[in-house]
Image: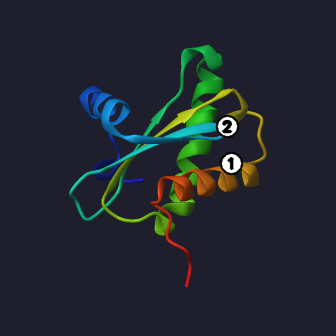
Amino acid sequence: MKRAVTLKENYEFRRLYSRGKSAVAPAMVVYCRRNGLDHNRFGFTVSTKLGCAVVRNRCRRRLREVCRLRQGQVKRGYDLVVVARGRTYSAPFRQLLCQFERTCQSLGIWEEQQ
């Protein structure tokens, strides 16, 4: 993903946590909120409780790839923060894709393919 479409600042994450809607899956939690732009911005969070830096970076890479593959089906104009949970590291990749789709559908930001 390009730098322009990622969330980096702490205040952006805090705003999403406090004012955004959330949906929970076994491997991730997705927070979303309208951003007033014509594109989506993604942020990724992995707690130090999940493991050492190698484990956290792998979880972050897997979530980033899920969002990259599915960003065309997410409605435009939203900020999304994806928080890794304990099963993110060991879950099959196809399961991560399905869980991301399900959470986006429950948030109402998923566009069906025509």
| Count of number-bearing discs | 2
Residue at 65% x, 41% y: name it.
Answer: 25
On screen, residue 86 versus residue 41, left or right, reads right
Location of residue 28 with respect to 106 vertically, above or below: above
* Element carrying mark 2: loop
Q: Residues within 10 Å of mark 1 (few under 14, many from 20)?
A: many
On screen, residue 65 versus residue 33, left or right, reads right
Q: Nearer the viewer, residue 38 or 111?
A: 111
Say which amino acid is labelled 2: Ala
Q: Nearer the viewer, residue 47 or 3?
A: 47
Query: Earlier along the polypeptide chain: callout 1 or callout 2?
Result: 2
Say which amino acid is labelled 1: Leu
Q: Quadrant of the C terminus?
A: bottom right
Residue 111 in the image: x percent, y percent? 49, 71
Residue corresponding to mark 1: 96
Residue at 60% x, 38% y: name it.
Answer: 28
Location of residue 60 with respect to 102 vertically, above or below: above
Residue 79 in the image: x percent, y percent? 34, 48
* Element carrying mark 1: helix
Displayed quadrant of residue 102: bottom right
Location of residue 73 with respect to 2 vertically, above or below: below
- Which disc, if any, is residue 105? none
On screen, residue 36 versus residue 19, left or right, reads left
Residue at 55% x, 54% y: name it.
Answer: 106
Dot 1 and dot 2 residues touching (CB under 8 Å) = yes
Q: Nearer the viewer, residue 32 or 94?
A: 32
Residue 32 in the image: x percent, y percent? 40, 46
Residue 54 in the image: x percent, y percent? 63, 24
Measured Cα–Cα span from mark 1 to mark 2: 7 Å
| Figure colour scheme | rainbow
Residue corresponding to mark 2: 27
Displayed quadrant of residue 40: bottom left
